[in-house]
Amino acid sequence: MSGWLQIPWVAGLVAFVESSKYAILFFGALLEGPLFMIGGGLLYHLGSVAPWPAYLALVFGDFAGDLVWYAMGYFGARPAILRWGRFINVAPPVVDAVERQFNRYHLWVLVISKLTMGFGFALTILTVAGMLRVPLWRYATINLVCGFVWTAFLFGIGYFFGNIYTVIPDSVRLAFAISGPIITILLLRFAAGVVSKRMQQ
C-alpha cells in the first residue's frame, strides 16, 4: 500500500477521504444506508473512525434520505407518482396495497418498515407516508428513533466483520472488506423479499 501512496493522485484521494470521512458516511447513508452502516462499523473496528461521530453521521444521513422520500410523496402530485413511480420502485399496485395498510396501521407500518428494510417496500412506504400526509413530526420521530436502533444493529454487524478481518490473510482482506458488507445487504434484502412475497400471497 505504501508504494501506491507515492502516486500523487492516490495520495490526494486518501487524504481527501481521511479529512472527509464523516461527511462521506453521512452522504453514503443518505444514498445507501445499510451498506455504509455496516462499512462504518468495520471502519470503527479498524480504528479509522471514532464511534460516536461515525454513528451519528450514519443515523442522520439515513434520516435525511427518509425526509427526501417523504417530501417526494408530499409534494409530488399523486398522478405523477403513479405514472413515474415505477422508475424508483414505487409501482402503482404496491402503492395501493401499502396505502390500504397505512390507513389502518400507519404507525406500525413505519416502525416495522424501518426495522426490516421495508420487507422490500421501503421506498414505497416512505413515499406513501408523504402522499397520505402523515404528520411530519410523527413521521420524523418514528424514523429517527427506529433509525438509531437499525443503525446500531448494522453498525454492530460491521464491527463483527472487523473481528474476522483481523484474522484472515492479508491477501484477501481487501476483497473481504468490499464483499462482506455487500453480501450481507443482499442476504437481508433477499430475506425481506421472501417475506414480502409471502405477505402478498
Image (cartoon, rainbow, N blue to C red):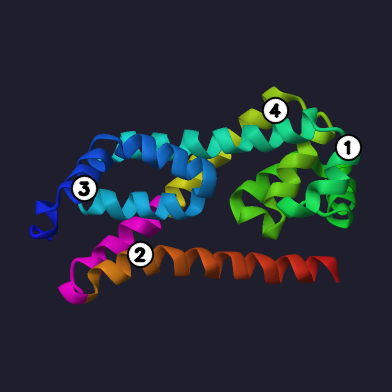
Residue 160 drawn at (x, y percent): 32, 61
Instruction: Assess disc 2: are there few (<14), some (14-19) or many (≥20) residues with their C-alpha within 10 Å of its C-alpha.
Output: few
What residue sits 82% from the left and 54% below the top?
A: 91
- Alpha-carbon span between mark 3 and mark 2: 21 Å
Which of the 4 image quadrants contains residue 136? top right
Specify which label sits upstream in the sequence, 3 or 2. 3
Name which residue lies at 27% across and 48% down: 44
Q: Are marks 3 and 1 in contact (CB under 8 Å)?
A: no
| Viewport quadrant of the C terminus | bottom right
The Cα atoms of the two marked residues, 2 and 4, are separated by: 36 Å
Mark with earlier residue (4, 1): 1
Disc nearest the viewer among 3 and 2: 3
Part of the protein shown in magenta: 155-171
Q: Please give the residue where the numbered disc 1 appears in the rendered image.
A: 78
Q: Residues within 10 Å of mark 4 (few under 14, many from 20)?
A: few
Where is mark 4, residue-wise? 138
Q: Quick check: 22 left or right of 184?
A: left
First in residue order: circle 3 vs circle 4: 3
- The kind of residue on which mark 2 rests is Ile
Along the line of sight, which residue is nearer the eye, 104 or 127? 127
Quote the CA–CA distance across marks 3 and 1.
47 Å
Q: Compute the Cα span from label 3 to label 4.
A: 46 Å
Q: Mark 3, residues whose alpha carbon is within 10 Å: few (<14), some, or many (≥20)? A: few
Of pointers 2 and 1, the one earlier in the residue sequence: 1
Q: Which residue is mark 2?
A: 178
